[in-house]
Image (cartoon, coloured by chain):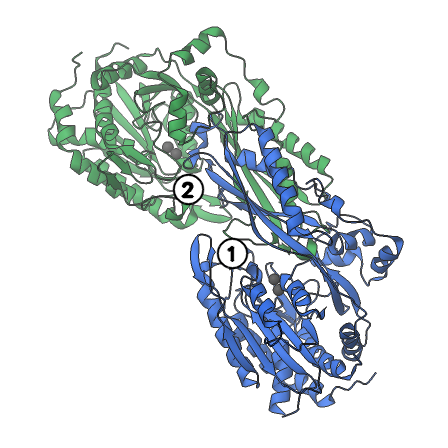
Chain colours: A blue, B green
Amino acid sequence: MPGPTPKEFLNYIDSHADGFIKRLSDAVAIPSISGDATHRKDVFAMADWLNGQLKQVGVDTKLVDLGRHTMDGEDLPLPPAILGQIGNDKGKKTVLIYGHFDVQPANKSDGWDTEPFTLTIDEKTGRLIGRGSSDDKGPILGWLNVLQYHHEKKVPLPVNIKFCFEGMEESGSEGLDELVERESKKGGYFDGVDCVCISDNYWLNTRTPALTYGLRGLSYYKVTISGPARDLHSGVFGRMVHEPMTDLIQLLNTLVSPQGDILVKGVDEMVPRPDEDEKAIYAGLNYSIADVEEAAGASIALSADKVSVLMGRMREPSLSIHGIEGAFSGAGAKTVIPAKVSGKFSIRLVPPQTPAAVDPLVIAHLEAAFAKLGSKNNLTIENLHGGKPWIADHRHWNFEAAKKATREVYGQEPDLTREGGSIPVTLTFAESLGVNVLLLPMGRGDDGAHSTNEKLDKSNFLEGSKLLGTYLYELAAIAK
Amino acid sequence: MPGPTPKEFLNYIDSHADGFIKRLSDAVAIPSISGDATHRKDVFAMADWLNGQLKQVGVDTKLVDLGRHTMDGEDLPLPPAILGQIGNDKGKKTVLIYGHFDVQPANKSDGWDTEPFTLTIDEKTGRLIGRGSSDDKGPILGWLNVLQYHHEKKVPLPVNIKFCFEGMEESGSEGLDELVERESKKGGYFDGVDCVCISDNYWLNTRTPALTYGLRGLSYYKVTISGPARDLHSGVFGRMVHEPMTDLIQLLNTLVSPQGDILVKGVDEMVPRPDEDEKAIYAGLNYSIADVEEAAGASIALSADKVSVLMGRMREPSLSIHGIEGAFSGAGAKTVIPAKVSGKFSIRLVPPQTPAAVDPLVIAHLEAAFAKLGSKNNLTIENLHGGKPWIADHRHWNFEAAKKATREVYGQEPDLTREGGSIPVTLTFAESLGVNVLLLPMGRGDDGAHSTNEKLDKSNFLEGSKLLGTYLYELAAIAK
Ligand SMILES: [Zn+2]
Ligand SMILES: [Zn+2]
Ligand SMILES: [Zn+2]
Ligand SMILES: [Zn+2]
C-alpha cells in the first residue's frame, strides 16, 4: 500500500544508517543518569548535546529551567526541559512529540557483557547495545533522523511539530507536570497542538509493531526499619535485640504472593473483572507464552494461559520488590546486623487505581503488619514517587494515522496494546491538552530497558525512523 | 593484693602510652580486609608489618605459607600465618597466644563518623576509633607492649611464649585448622604448650573485666533464587513472571521470628533447657538490660528479663539475616526485577549444635519452603563457612591465673561469661592440643567490632596491656 511518504525519505534513512548509529553512539556515551546525584552534570551535558542536535536540523529551541529539588538529602538543580518547534503553518496539523534524554543507572558490574555507556554493535545479531539505546535515546534520535532528511533536502515537513524533551523521566519527571500544564494553556508553548506522539515503550513481542493506548501507573514505596544506633555484630547481639532485617523481611513478605497476587487488602479488588469481549482482545494479540519467556530468558511465566499472562501485564496491577538499601549487599560473608534497612517496592496501577487511592491502603497495611510483629524498632514509610494510569481512544485519527504508517513501513497490522510500564507525563499531556495521545514504540519486547545489556535492534532503529516519518505524512493526510 | 608482677612493668605501660597508641595507629592504617580480594595485598602488608614488630621485641618468627583459595570466583594467595616463640626454659610453663591481624570491611560511606583506617583519638571520651582497633589489632598490640618492656629492660619473661597470628579470621580462618593440627603433634611447633590464651572478644558490659569460657559456633548460608536471564523492567514484566525477590523474601521470612525464635524445625530444640543452677550464673552477672541497650544505642532488647536476654546471647542459638546480594541496594527508586538474588543469613550455634548437625535441617527447611511457593525459579543453597561452638573449664589454673591478674590490675572480680560470637580456631586449639584455652578480652561490650565507628578505649588498651603481662606472671606462679 503506497502512502504519501516520499520514497526519497525512506531511501535516505537506509543510506545514512552509519551516521545515525554514530550519533546514537555519541548519545549513549553521555551517562545521563537522573537518579544518581553524581551524574547530574551528565544529564545537563546531555541536554546541551540534544539541544545542539535539534538546532542543527532546523528546530527552534529553548531550554526551560525547572528549578531545584532534593534527592537523597542533597539539594540539586533539575536538568532543563527542551522545548522546540518547527513549522507554523495554520493549514497543517500540529503534533507534539515527547521524549526523555535521561537514563536508568548502569554499571558493568551489574552484569553487563559490555561497557554500558559505550554503544556496542553486535554485527551478528544487529543489536545496538548500551544504556539508553532503546529507552529513550534511540527513539529521540529517530526523530532527529527524520528531521535531518527534511532539513538537508529542504523538504517541508507535512505537519507542524512541537517538541518536549525532559531529563528526569526515570526519576519521577520532577518539574515537568507544572511546565506542561502551564504551556498547555491559551497562549502557551503547546497551545494549538492537535495530538501527541510519544515513542518510549516497546512492542509486545519481537515481531509485530505495536500501538499502545494504555499505561499502568506507579506508586513507589520505601519502607524503613531502624533500631540500633549503628550496625551490630551478630555474635555479640544475636538473640538479644530486635533486628531490623528480621522485621523488614516480615513486612515485605506480606505484600505479594509468589503467584503475583497483591496481598495488600483492597488493591487487587479495586479493578473490575474483564468481560468476555475484553478477554477476546488479549486472545487476539500476536503473542505467546514463549514470547514472554524468551524476553525474560527463562521459563518463568506465572501461567500457561496467554490471556491470563497478558492481562497480568496490561490490565492488572503488579507489585515488585526491588531490593533493600542499608543491608549487607556485597559478596562474601559479613556477619552484621544492619542498623537501618529500607525495603523498596512499587505497585503498577491500572484504572481506576490512583496513587491517592492506593497509598492509604499500603500505609495502613504496613502499619498493621508492623504492629503485629511486637518489635521495638521503628517504622517509617515514604512514597518516593507516583503516577496515575492512563487509557486513550485507539479509534482516534491519531491512532489511525499510525496504523496506516505501520502497514506502509512494516507491511503488518500493528498490535493494539496496553503497556505495563508507566510514563506519567502521558497522562499529564492528555489531561492538560485535552487531545489524543499516541504511544508509538520503536523497540522490541526483549530490549531490556532498565536492565543489563539494554539494546535496540538496528532494524528497529532504521525502520522505526521510517515509521516516525511516515506517521507524520499520514497524520497530514488523514481527516480530523 | 600485690602480685608477682614487677611494678616497673606497670609503670612502663603508663609512661609509654603515646608510643603504643602511635603503633596502634600504624596498624589500623593498613586496611587488611581478608574478605575483599582487592585488599588481599594489604593483608600481606599487615603480616610483614607485624612480623617486623615481633622481631624488634625479640620474638623468633617464621611466616607459614597457607597456599591459595578461591573467593568470589577468584583464585587468591592466602596471607601467611605468623608463628613465633620467645623463651625455651624447661622450668617454665609455655603459653600459646593467638590473634588475627585481618579486619572486617569498612567504608566511610557505611556511616563512619571518621575515616575507618585512620586511628582517631577522641580526647574527650578517650576512645581510639578505627577499624581493627578492638578486633583484633589492639589486643595483638597489647602483647607487643608487654614484650617491648621485657626486651628493652632485658627482663626475662616469666613463661615461655609461642605465638600464632593469622590473617583470615574474618573470612573463616582458611588454612589455619590444618596448620594448628599439624603443629600440635609431637615435634610440632606447638608441642609442649601448657595452655592457650586468646584476646579477641569483649567484656559483657563497659565496667567489668571478663574471662570467657564459651563461644557460639557459626553456620553461614547463602540462599540464591535465580530466574530471568537478566534483570527485568517491572513495568514490562510485573505480574507476568515469577520474581526472584518475591520468592527469596518468602524464604527468608520462614527463618526467624521478630522475637528471635529460630523457625527452622529442630534447631532451637537441639539445645537442652537450663536448670535453676545455670540460670543463677546469668542472674549473678554484672549486667542489666540498660547495658545491652546502651551498647546497641536503642531500647530494643528482646525482653525486659536480664537472664533471658543474657541466655539469648550466651547459651541460645541465634539467626540473623545480614542482607541480599544482587538486588537493588542503592539510593533512589529503581524499578528493577533483579534476575538473581542471594539472601545471606547465619546461625550462631551452641553445644551440642554443630554445623554438621544443623546444615541438613536448614537445607531441608529451605527446600520444603521453596517447594511450597510453586515458583518456576531456581533455588540453590550454599554454606559459606561454619565452625563448632566451644566450652572450657573455667576452674582450670589457666583461668585462675587470669582471675588473679584481673583482681590485681582492675581490683575487681571478672565476670565469667560465654560469648555470642565465634572464633572457630579456639576449638581447633582445644581439640588439637588437648589443653585449656582461656579467652581474655581487652575491649568493652560497646566497642562495635564489625560495625561502624569501631573503637577501643585508651584505658582498656593500657590496663589491658598490664592485664596481659600480669596474667603471664600469675601463670608462672600458679600450681599446675
Ligand atoms: Zn523511557
Ligand atoms: Zn525508562
Ligand atoms: Zn576478632
Ligand atoms: Zn571479628
Q: Position of residue A23 (x, y in %)?
A: 56, 78
Looking at the picture, tell me which residue is in the foreground, A412 or B4: A412
Circle 1 SS class: helix
Tell me which chain the residue with mark 1 is part of.
A
Looking at the picture, tell me which residue is in the foreground, B434 or B367: B367
Circle 2 SS class: loop
Looking at the picture, tell me which residue is in the foreground, A50 or B154: A50
For label 2, the residue is B67
Q: Quadrant of residue A114?
A: bottom right
Q: How far apart are marks 1 and 2 (CA)?
A: 28 Å
| Residue at x 44%, y 61% (from the top left corner) | A76
Q: Quarter containing ligand 2? A: bottom right
- Mark 1 closeness class: few <14, some 14–19, many ≥20 residues within 10 Å: few
For label 1, the residue is A109
Q: Where is residue B167 in the image (x, y as percent from the top left)?
A: 36, 38
Looking at the picture, tell me which residue is in the foreground, B137 or B246: B246
State left or right for residue B192 relative to residue A427: left
- Please tell me whether mark 1 or mark 2 is closer to you in this view: 1
User: From the viewer's perspective, is residue A246 above or below residue A262?
Assistant: above
Would residue B182 be visible to someone looking at this image? no
Q: Where is residue A329 in the image (x, y as percent from the top left)?
A: 50, 45
| Residue at x 64%, y 88% (from the top left corner) | A150
Mark 2 residue type: Gly
Q: In which quarter of the image is the N terminus of chain B?
A: top left
Q: In which quarter of the image is residue B146?
A: top left
Q: In which quarter of the image is the C terminus of chain B?
A: top left
State if disc 2 and disc 1 touch (CB < 8 Å): no
- Residue lying farthest bottom? A154
State left or right for residue A411 relative to residue A160: right
Would residue B310 be visible to someone looking at this image? yes
- Mark 2 closeness class: few <14, some 14–19, many ≥20 residues within 10 Å: few
Mark 1 residue type: Ser
